[in-house]
Amino acid sequence: MGDLLLVRHGETEWSVSGQHTSWTDLPLTQHGEEQAKSLAPLLTGRTYALALSSPLDRAIRTAELAGLTGVVPDPDLHEWDYGGYEGITTAEIHRSRPDWYLWADGVPPGPQGHPGESPEQIGERADRVLRKVETALTTGTGDVVLVAHAHFLRVLTARRLGLPPAEGRLFQLATGTVSRLSTEHGWPVIAEWNKQP
C-alpha cells in the first residue's frame, strides 16, 4: 500500500499575517517560493500513482517548484471557505466574538458564492478526496501526493485517521512542509509531520 503525502503550499503574505485565506488567490512570497523549491528532495525518488493539487495558484506553484509533474487540479482540495472571515485574523474576530473558535463555530456567510463552510462540510470534501485516492493507494503502484492548504489538510488527516472533522484542530501544519500518512498493521497512522529539508 502506498503512502499519502500531504504538501502544504509555501508562504503567502496572509499566511505570515495570520489572515484567513481561502478563495483569495495570493501568490507565494519570495520565501514561499524558496520553501517550495526546498521540498524537492523530500518528494523526488518516489513513484506517484496519483498527484492532485488545489486549483489555487499558491498550491499549483508550490507543486511546480517542488518538481512534481502530472499534477491534476481538484476543486475538492480547495481551502476551507472562510465566508465573512476571509482576510480577517483571529485576533480581529475575537474583538467582537471573544469565544469564537473556527473548529467549533465555523464562519458566517461571506459575499455571493462564498457562504462559508462548517467543519462537517470540509469533512465531506475530505472524504471525497480520500475515496478518489483509495484505489491509487491500494494498487501498490506508488504513493499519492496532495498539494493543498493547512486547514483542509488538517481535516483530511483527521478523516484518514477515522476522527471527526473538527479533530483536525490537533494537527498544526506549517507552510512549505511535507507530511506523510502511512499504515501500520493495516491501520492509518501519521508517519511524518511538518517535515522540512
Image (cartoon, rainbow, N blue to C red):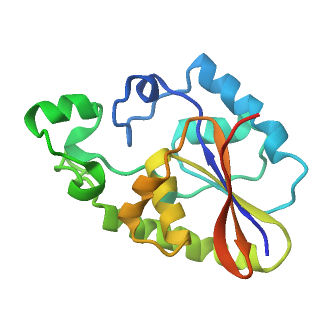
Residue at the image point whose x is 55% and y is 48% from the top: 148
The percent position of residue 136, horizontal first and vertical second, equals 74, 73
The percent position of residue 134, horizontal first and vertical second, equals 66, 77
The percent position of residue 194, horizontal first and vertical second, equals 63, 43
Q: In the shown orientation, is residue 63 left or right of residue 22? A: right
Can residue 50 be seen by looking at this rendering?
A: no
Q: Quadrant of the N terminus?
A: bottom right
- Which one is nearer the viewer's eye here, 111 or 89? 89
Can residue 102 be seen by looking at this rendering?
A: yes
Q: In the shown orientation, is residue 85 left or right of residue 126? A: left
Residue at the image point whose x is 28% and y is 31% from the top: 89
Q: In the shown orientation, is residue 107 left or right of residue 192? A: left
Q: Quadrant of the C terminus?
A: top right
- Which one is nearer the viewer's eye here, 153 or 183? 183
The quadrant in which residue 11 appears is top right
Q: Residue furthest left?
A: 96
